[in-house]
Amino acid sequence: MKELICFLCPNGCTLSVTQEQSEFSVTGQKCKRGQEFAINEATNPTRTLCTTVKTNFAEMPVLPVRSARAIPKNHIFSVMAAINQVVVTEVLCCGAPVITNVLDLGIDIIATASMEATR
């Protein structure tokens, strides 16, 4: 049995997940999203990654970025290593890709702020 706290809605339900062969049983959820969350956490946990990348601009030495979609938890450290190798050399707008298809995961790392002030 695995104990989890669901963070998909304000309820913050304490969930219990048990697996018998290929079937999952979830208890403690107050909504449908809790059951989906618990099964996903038990089978393929993912997280959205938020961090910064270096830039060549003194006015904005780092640019905040995030993954466009959730990344499998087992790839977080390798994605961070790839992000740490990047230095932004051109002015980007919010939502612009900083890394396209990071580590062939099909997930982009995108800017979460605009750099217009650095022009």
Image: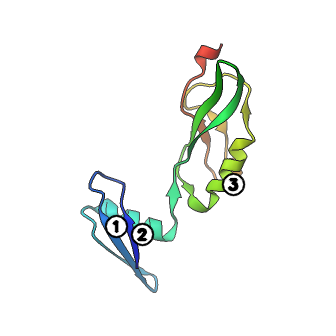
Give the residue type at disc 2: Ile
Numbered badge on residue 78: 3
Q: In the displayed structure, would residue 68 be above or below residue 11?
A: above
Residue 39's disc number: 2
Task: Please say if 33 is above or below 64.
Answer: below
Residue 66, by quadrant, is top right
Identity, as a three-letter code, of the amino acid under mark 1: Gln
Quarter of the rendering containing residue 50: top right
Q: Earlier in the sequence, mark 3 or mark 2?
A: 2
Q: Tell me what residue is drawn at x 60 percent, y 21 percent.
A: 115
Element carrying mark 2: helix
CB within 8 Å, label 2 to label 1: yes
Residue type at numbered disc 3:
Ser
State whether residue 119 is above or below residue 69: above
For mark 1, what is the residue?
35
Mark 1 vs mark 3: give the one in front: 3
Does the CB distance between marks 1 and 3 fall below 8 Å? no
Which comes before the other along the chain, label 1 or label 3?
1
Rendered image coloring scheme: rainbow
- C-alpha distance separating marks 3 and 2: 25 Å
Residue 12 in picture, x, y percent from top left: 30, 57
Of the 4 image quadrants, the one containing the C terminus is: top right
Q: Disc 2 and disc 1: Cα gap in Å? A: 6 Å
Residue 23 vs residue 10, the one in the foreground: 10
Q: Position of residue 36 (x, y in %)?
A: 38, 64
Q: Could you tell me how far apart the alpha carbons at marks 1 and 3 are, in whole angstroms?
A: 29 Å
Is disc 2 surrounded by few (<14), some (14 to 19) or many (20+) residues within 10 Å?
Answer: some
Determine the residue positioned at 50% across, 70% down: 43
